[in-house]
Amino acid sequence: MAGVYLHVPFCRQACHYCDFHFSTNTQTVDAMVRSIASEARLRAPHFWGSLHGPVTTLYLGGGTPSLLPPDAMKQLVRGVCDALRLDVSTLAEVTLEANPEDLEDERLDAWLEVGFNRLSVGIQSFDDETLIWMNRAHTGREAEQGILRAHAAGFETITVDLIYGVPTGRQWQDDVERALALPVRHLSAYALTVEPQTALGTRVERGEENPSPDERTVQEYHHLCSVMADRGWSHYETSNWAAPRGDDSHWKAIHNSAYWSGKPYLGLGPGAHGFLAPERYANVSNNPAYIRALEQGALSESRETLSRADRYNEAIMTGLRTAHGIHPEDLHEAHGLRPDVVDPKVWSHALSCGDLVPMEGGRFRIPETQWITGDRVAAALFHVA
Ligand code: SF4
């Protein structure tokens, strides 16, 4: 199975912590929609030639794809699906990232008509003082009302994003409670990171602001882990929780789960990445340059062929971010390397100090209590040529 990701690189305003690729100049929306469809046409033959299974998910991220006018949204999805010969109605998961201020009746109806069956809403916090500090374009109340409107309109699968480790007076417990009081089936929570090329990064560098102390960040993460466990949600990836479905399964994200298990995906749009083994590509992160290249029938991208060690290291990193963990024999079969042989000392140390714990069936994972700093454990297990 494979996924298709579309990057819509426009936002109304720049959140002060964000270093994703986006522009607040929306004058090129129409040209961008045409260009993304052109990119899909150019990539289609190679994409289908590299796949060994069906496409099951479509994900519109950004940026803020929900700010596209409904007609542009329809044109974008239709253009890409025609180019890739995809029928949206047959896909298992069709996700739209939306900001709360866009959750209006007219847009919601248009999105359902296009075929979206999952909304990913960037709330980040319900605390208005914190939202102003972040430079978000909505209030906490608007986010709550928007989610209720989306649910009433027919979106049954809604996921929300929150940010913890924020140095404001906000009570994290309140944010968690307000999110869980809504009809949501999935929650992603990320620690605030101070990126250098952002307004927040500049303020921190000038000494005008201090990041949240690590202890508070860790405490907030553990608070969330414990609340979600009490409610029976599955903590299936470091930053992701899925609500129970009523049978023995949970509402896990299909598209993102495919990234974590090394499945192929096509990325379209400026700044998007794609992975079609053994190659990864990255489109230029510049809207005019991206559009110019496609108007001339070309791609503006960089490519790299991943070595056996690169793919092994990625499998370690992504696998250890999941509750499923890693299986040394599976890694050996897929990449010819296994962590207990690559560096037996590091492997034994990780096991003896509890950074890694054995699971049933010969798998190993990072325990939930140490997950927040788990990337360090994964990096120590990398194969360095
Ligand atoms: S809306 Fe999302 S992509 Fe846009 S600036 Fe804010 S966090 Fe970044």
Image (cartoon, rainbow, N blue to C red):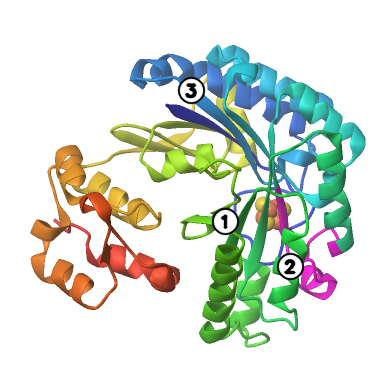
> What's the mark number on residue 65?
none
| SS assignment at label 1 | loop
| Residue at mark 2 | 177
Q: CA distance from mark 1 to mark 3?
A: 28 Å
User: Which of these two is toward me, 325 or 337?
Assistant: 325
Residue 200 as seen in the image, left or right of residue 30:
left
| SS assignment at label 2 | helix
The magenta stretch is 121-140
Percent from the top left, x then y, of residue 123? 74, 58
Mark 3 residue type: Val
Single out the residue that lies furthest toward the front.
Answer: 247
| 2 or 3: tag closer to the N-terminus | 3
| 1 or 2: tag closer to the N-terminus | 2
Task: For the residues labelled 2 and 3, say whether their Cβ atoms are less than 8 Å apart.
Answer: no
Residue 9 as seen in the image, left or right of residue 327:
right
| Residue at mark 3 | 55
Percent from the top left, x then y, of residue 297? 54, 19
Mark 1 or 3: in front is 1
Mark 2 or 3: in front is 2
Residue drawn at the location 17% of the way across and 74% of the way down: 349
Single out the residue that lies furthest toward the right.
Answer: 105
| SS assignment at label 3 | strand
